[in-house]
Image (cartoon, rainbow, N blue to C red):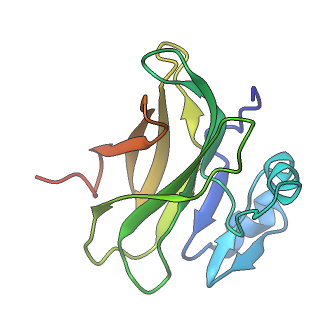
């Protein structure tokens, strides 16, 4: 639960420019998206029952406000056609297989050229993590928190998806 992908590791994108592919190496295609997940995360997910087909934007140990530690994974739930920002989470307690839980659609507008980078745990708040994103080249950050009921709360901190 301690692996941390580099913050500039691109995980998911609608479109990747050719120069990015040349610099960062091979990618996969899933449901119309270009994906470039860290290999260790994909190996872990494939070893579990009912593994998610999409790579996680964030997967790390987090602790709820009351101190319960869980492996927390967040995935992009959108499609190349919806233009929105939707996510689902799996909170794994080590005993039972976690079912995916849809997180509220953060913002449903017509976004194109979405990119999501590897989420980062907050060293100062054990429940918190952040995921950097870009829409049409404009950068922003989405925050997430593990809750006491084993759900994940997410909200846009800044960038093009921030509500006015």
Image spot of residue 97 (x, y percent): 71, 50
Quadrant location of the N terminus in the rendered image? top right
**Nearer to us in this view, 66 or 158:** 66
- Asked if residue 68 is positioned above or below residue 109 in the image, the reply reads above
Is 138 placed left or right of 120 in the picture?
A: left
Residue that sits furthest to the front in the current view: 96
Q: Quadrant of residue 102?
A: bottom left
Q: Residue at x 79, y 48 (%)?
A: 41
**Nearer to us in this view, 70 or 117:** 70
Q: Give the number of callouts.
A: 0
Q: Is residue 3 visible?
A: yes
- Asked if residue 15 is positioned above or below residue 135 in the image, the reply reads below
Q: Is residue 142 visible?
A: no
Q: Residue at x 81, y 60 (%)?
A: 49
Image spot of residue 147 (x, y percent): 42, 32
Image spot of residue 4 (x, y percent): 71, 32
Q: Residue at x 34, y 73 (%)?
A: 111
Q: Residue at x 60, y 57 (%)?
A: 99
Is 153 placed left or right of 150 in the picture?
A: left
- Asked if residue 9 is positioned above or below residue 13 in the image, the reply reads above
Is 132 placed left or right of 117 in the picture?
A: left
Image spot of residue 151 (x, y percent): 45, 42
Q: Quadrant of residue 72?
A: top right
């Amino acid at each position: 639960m301690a692996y941390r992908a580099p913050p500039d590791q691109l995980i998911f994108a609608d479109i990747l420019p050719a120069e990015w592919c040349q610099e960062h190496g091979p990618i996969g295609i899933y449901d119309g998206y270009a994906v470039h997940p860290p290999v260790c995360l994909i190996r872990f997910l494939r070893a579990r029952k009912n593994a998610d087909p999409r790579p996680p934007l964030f997967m790390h140990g987090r602790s709820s406000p009351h101190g319960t530690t869980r492996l927390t994974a967040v995935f992009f739930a959108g499609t190349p056609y919806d233009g929105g920002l939707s996510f689902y989470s799996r909170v794994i307690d080590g005993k039972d297989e976690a079912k995916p839980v849809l997180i509220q659609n953060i913002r449903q507008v017509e976004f194109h050229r979405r990119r999501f980078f590897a989420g980062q745990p907050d060293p100062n708040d054990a429940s918190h993590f952040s995921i950097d994103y870009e829409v049409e080249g404009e950068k922003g950050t989405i925050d997430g928190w593990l809750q006491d009921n084993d759900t994940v709360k997410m909200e846009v901190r800044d960038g093009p998806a921030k509500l006015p």
